[in-house]
Amino acid sequence: MRRSPRKSANSRGIREPGKVWSGCMILDQATRLLRLLPAETAHCATIALGGAGASLLPKAAADDPRLAISALGLSFPNPVGLAAGFDKNAQVPDAMAKLGFGFVECGTVTPLPQSGNPKPRLFRLSEDRAVINRLGFNNGGMAQAARNLARRKSKGLVGINIGANKESVDRIADYARGFAELSSLADYVTVNVSSPNTPGLRGLQNKDELTRLLAALTQTRKNKIPLLLKIAPDLDAPALDDIAAVVRASGIEGLIVSNTTLARPPLASRHAGETGGLSGAPLLAPSTEILRQMRLRLGNAVTLVGVGGISSGADAYAKIRAGASLVQLYTALVYEGPGLVGRIKRELAVLLAREGFAHVADAVGADARP
């Protein structure tokens, strides 16, 4: 009796690891080539390539089940997300999800299109593994973002980050418009009041203004879509106290800590003196400390998302132990390429096992307990 031919890995629906890695290796090589271009040109080229080649990207390998986490009323396959700023117009969220991100945040989107600040406005600080940007919410406006989100085919989790136009006379009304237009097209909405590149925007972090802003949004949302607030790292203790009090009273579901910083620690790059927000490795320690401080103030009242300087599993783990249920990265992709996402997840799983945590949720806030 003849035996049936042995089924291949692909016929059983299991992806061959070699093919996944070859795809990542090609993308990482492309990253190195793109770094030869000016920073903003390279970014635009990356978005164009992502849009054109999304269907050619292999689906990411299945995540380690220890990395799955429930937060914001949603189920995340892993806690590693793409931060806002990369895909401002929601052009390539499905392509980025294929790289292995557990979620992708698009934006910042303003109600009306705006060109942003004069160029050059984006600078690599290679020696410092950092970036300075003063882009100024350059985007195609909420109508364009809405069209792009409506065309999505993937079911991956996507957030939308909303902001106000630079010349707006009523910025709270801008947030309300963006929320009304885009909230039904995303899995969560982030309110960005912490960009340093729109004059006066960070004033919305003040207690009275923030109370008005969050009330305007929470009182008008018809569904229970999670609402998050993104704050700056350049806040003193009284400001953190005020924000924690407003967040508790508002009923929002999450807090993202943090945006870029105006601070300038010692830097080696020739671009160190450029104005704008600093992101990347120098932001890791200060943003993680602000995250820990907010965890101490808020406990489990809201979901915390840790952002700033993540370039390894150890960095992500530090954010999680400081109180983050979810983490986001962007700048490190400029230097490491898309293979970084899988490496962070593998390293994170190893760290959890090494320290006796059966699940990533068990490690959340381990270093921020009174």
Image (cartoon, rainbow, N blue to C red):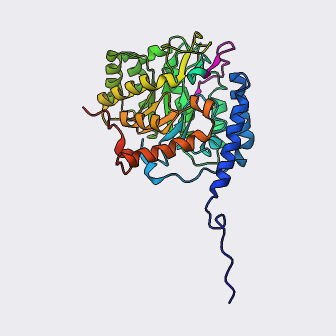
Check the image and name the residue furthest to the left. 370
Q: Nearer the viewer, residue 183 or 43?
A: 43
Name the image quarter holding residue 243: top left
Residue 93 seen by the camera:
yes
116 falls in the magenta region: yes
Q: Looking at the image, which residue is at 62% across and 13% down?
A: 271
Q: Would you say 73 lies left or right of 3 here?
A: left
Question: How many discs mark residues in the rendered view?
Answer: 0
Residue 74 seen by the camera:
no
Q: Looking at the image, which residue is at 31% across and 32% down?
A: 368
Q: Position of residue 106 (x, y in %)?
A: 58, 33
Q: Position of residue 23 (x, y in %)?
A: 69, 47
Q: Which of 139 and 232 is in front in this view?
A: 232
Q: Looking at the image, which residue is at 55% across and 20% down?
A: 164
Check the image and name the residue furthest to the bottom. 1
Which quadrant of the figure contains the C terminus? top left
32 falls in the magenta region: no
Q: Position of residue 279 (x, y in %)?
A: 53, 23
Q: Where is residue 265 in the image (x, y as percent from the top left)?
A: 48, 14
Q: Would you say 318 lies left or right of 185 here?
A: left
Q: Give the range drawn in magenta.
A: 107-126
Q: Looking at the image, which residue is at 48% across and 43% down?
A: 347
Q: In this view, does 40 lie above or below 48?
A: above
Instruction: Name the chief secondary structure element in magenta.
Output: loop
Which quadrant of the figure contains the N terminus? bottom right
